Amino acid sequence: MLYQTIDILGTVAFAISGVLVAMEKRLDLFGVLIIAFVTAIGGGTLRDLLIGNTPVGWMTDITYMITIFIAVVFAIIFVNQLKYVRRSLFLFDTIGIGLYTMVGVEKGLQAELLPVVCIALGTMTACFGGVLRDILCNEIPVIFRKEIYATACILGGASYFLFTGGLSMREDYAYIAAILVVIVLRTLAVLFGIRLPNIYKREA
């Protein structure tokens, strides 16, 4: 039950983040729907294809499409209340990567994969939808900038195995704690301007 709830919440968060980007780019209604859909299911689709879980989840469960549609309608109706679009986008995107990281890790565990592979699947699930969203909206994806994004997902996924293995925490508590690790790390990185090192030398 916890897994399904987290999955739906992640779908909502990413769908809304897709709507915000699409509306900022002044796309038409069809464009907004497409961007929201791609953002919400892009990472999960790639993950399911890699582990051979086909047809992918949203094709076999209409709940995802209904959830995305409702999230799009909600975001469009209340877009005026979201006065600070960039802040709103950051909020929903950060919540989305936290939730989806653990959805991906759980899928890896169900497929009986190694922890490091589960972490990779979690990171992929969390980040790939946003990558597609940004590419379609002619933006450089956040994951390819210096911001702490995928790194937060990796550390959050790793923390789950630390919590359950090293600290013997209950799985449901560890699940929620790992989500919070991703969200907190990403938020702190943005608030304090923490970035990955620049590998390029400055020009003289």
Image (cartoon, rainbow, N blue to C red):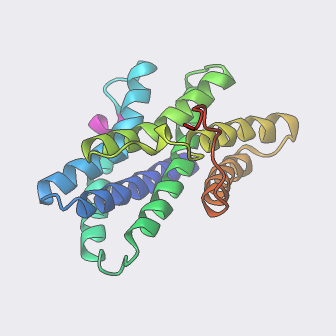
Residue 21 quadrant: bottom left
Count how many numbered circles sit on residues in the image.
Answer: 0
What range of the chain is rendered magenta?
57-62
* Nearer to us in this view, 159 or 195: 195
Which quarter of the rendering shows the C terminus?
Answer: top right
Viewer can see residue 61: no
Residue 140: x %, y % from top left: 38, 42
| Residue at point 29%, 59% (across, down) | 19
Q: Is residue 156 above or below residue 185?
A: above
Residue 48 quadrant: top left
Q: Is residue 148 above or below residue 29?
A: above
Q: Is 149 positioned to the left or the right of 16 in the image?
A: right
Q: Is residue 39 above or below residue 42?
A: below
Residue 92: x %, y % from top left: 46, 60
* Direction right: furthest residue: 167
SS assignment for the magenta stretch, majority: helix
Q: Is 55 positioned to the left or the right of 198 in the image?
A: left
Residue 181: x %, y % from top left: 69, 51
Residue 116 on the magenta span: no
| Residue at point 39%, 40% (across, down) | 131
Residue 60 on the magenta span: yes
